[in-house]
Amino acid sequence: MTALNRVPSLLTRAGTASALTLAAVGGSIAVPGLATDAAAAPMAAKALRIAASKKGAPYQYGATGPRRFDCSGLTLYAYKKAGKHLPRTAAAQYNKTHHVSASKRKAGDLVFFHSGRSVYHVGIYAGKGKIWHSPKTGDVVRLQKIWTKSVWYGRVS
């Protein structure tokens, strides 16, 4: 019996009233085996793939793609293509995300570089301590190891 075939029997055991209550409040029923981490965050995974697909695109201050990017232009472009609107600047993007600790970071989260309380750079976390980003004038979109501990993480929701 597949997980999908078990849903009706789960509803029967939960009771019709419980199912109606869930439907009335817009709830959902979690069925073990149906969701994976990848399915739970398809937008972040898609944004990460889009950013990686821009490997080698030149940095240009103020550019938001599709051929040239600055740091926040790359994150804005990647998430827009994944279906989510972000503000234009790195600092505004930080303010718009759900802040997470380094221990809770996931691929697709945004990585914000800061000096004191000022955010000055952003990239997309790729896992294993690396980010996709558009670094600076004369450089290109690339995968790079995070080079400082002065970072904050934000999850786009």
Image (cartoon, helix red, strand yellow):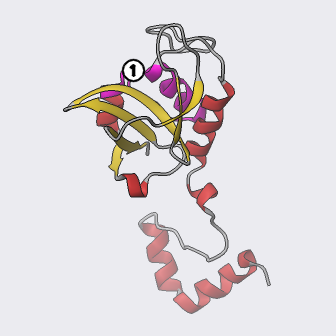
In the rendered image, the residue lying farthest to the front is: 147
Identify the residue at image location x=49%, y=28%: 75
The quadrant where residue 91 appears: top left
**Which of 126/79 is in front?**
126
**At x 59% / y 84%, what residue is drawn?**
11
**How far across and down, in percent of the image, does residue 93 sit?**
36, 31
- Residue 23: give x, y in percent of width and height: 49, 69
- Res 86 seen here: no
Residue 124 % position (x, y): 50, 36
Q: Quadrant of the N terminus?
A: bottom right
What residue is rendered at 59% in x and 60% in y?
37
Q: Most prominent secondary structure in the magenta stretch? A: helix
Magenta-highlighted residues:
71-91
**Total marks in image:** 1
- Residue 82 among magenta residues: yes
**Quarter of the rendering containing residue 46:** top right
Image position, residue 105 (x, y; %)? 44, 52
Choose between 44 and 4: the one closer to the eye.
Answer: 44
Left or right of 78, for residue 146: left
Amino acid at the residue labelled 1 = Arg
Q: Nearer the viewer, residue 20 or 144?
A: 144
Q: Secondary structure at mark 1?
A: loop
Against 4, residue 111 (above or below) is: above
Inspect this view and state whether residue 113 appears: yes
**Going by the image, does 40 lie left or right of 110?**
right
What residue would you read off at disc 1? Answer: 88
Toward which corner of the image does residue 96 lie, by quadrant? top left
On the rendered structure, is 73 left or right of 67?
left
